[in-house]
Amino acid sequence: IPGSYEQNNIFAKIIRGEASAARVYEDDAVVAFMDIQPVERGHVLVISKTSKARNLLEIDLADLDKIMAVARRVGQAQMKALGANGFSIEQNNAYGQTVFHLHVHVIPRYRGQPWGE
Ligand code: 5GP
């Protein structure tokens, strides 16, 4: 997509501590926090703290690997701690994307709950 990474997007501010977020996991490379408008109870976002990628086309695969390792652990925790029956990984690129710092949605899925928006 045209343009470049915007340093003052909301997730960059969360990384720098300039905006608050309910963090559920953090290390040197990755942070995971609760989505402010969850589509399902326990909806988490996972982002890189070091990559300036806006989307999947721009991210280094080594950085993506670290994000996905955390996303998998978050999904496991949703099943164990929240009683989710499973989880969905979603990741929007350009169209449908509202925050332009690559993020992976980890959405717990509960049997009997309607699927989708
Ligand atoms: P996208 O549509 O770009 O894939 O998803 C962006 C996500 O970021 C949305 O699910 C939205 O609810 C979430 N979001 C937007 N602003 C904030 C914020 O300030 N804090 C948190 N925790 N989530 C946000």
Image (tube, rainbow, N blue to C red):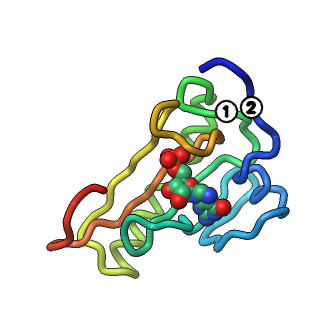
Q: Residue furthest left?
A: 112
Type of the residue with mark 1 = Ala
Which callout, 2 or 1, points at the residue further toward the start of the chain? Answer: 2
User: Height in image: 36 above or below 10?
Assistant: below
Type of the residue with mark 2 = Tyr
Q: Nearer the viewer, residue 68 or 40?
A: 40
User: Height in image: 88 above or below 21?
Assistant: above
User: Height in image: 1 above or below 117?
Assistant: above
Q: Is residue 48 left or right of residue 16?
A: left
Identify the residue shown where x is 61% and y is 45%. 99
**Which disc, if any, is residue 53?**
1
SS assignment at label 1? loop
Relative image position of residue 22 (x, y in whole percent) = 64, 74
Q: CA distance from mark 2 to mark 1?
A: 7 Å
CB atoms at circles 2 and 1 under 8 Å apart?
yes
Q: Nearer the viewer, residue 44 or 9?
A: 9
| Image quarter hosting the C terminus | bottom left
**Which disc, if any, is residue 5?**
2
Residue 70 visible? no
Relative image position of residue 29 (x, y in whole percent) = 71, 50
Q: Badge 2, how many Cα within 10 Å: few under 14, some, many 20+?
A: few
SS assignment at label 2? loop
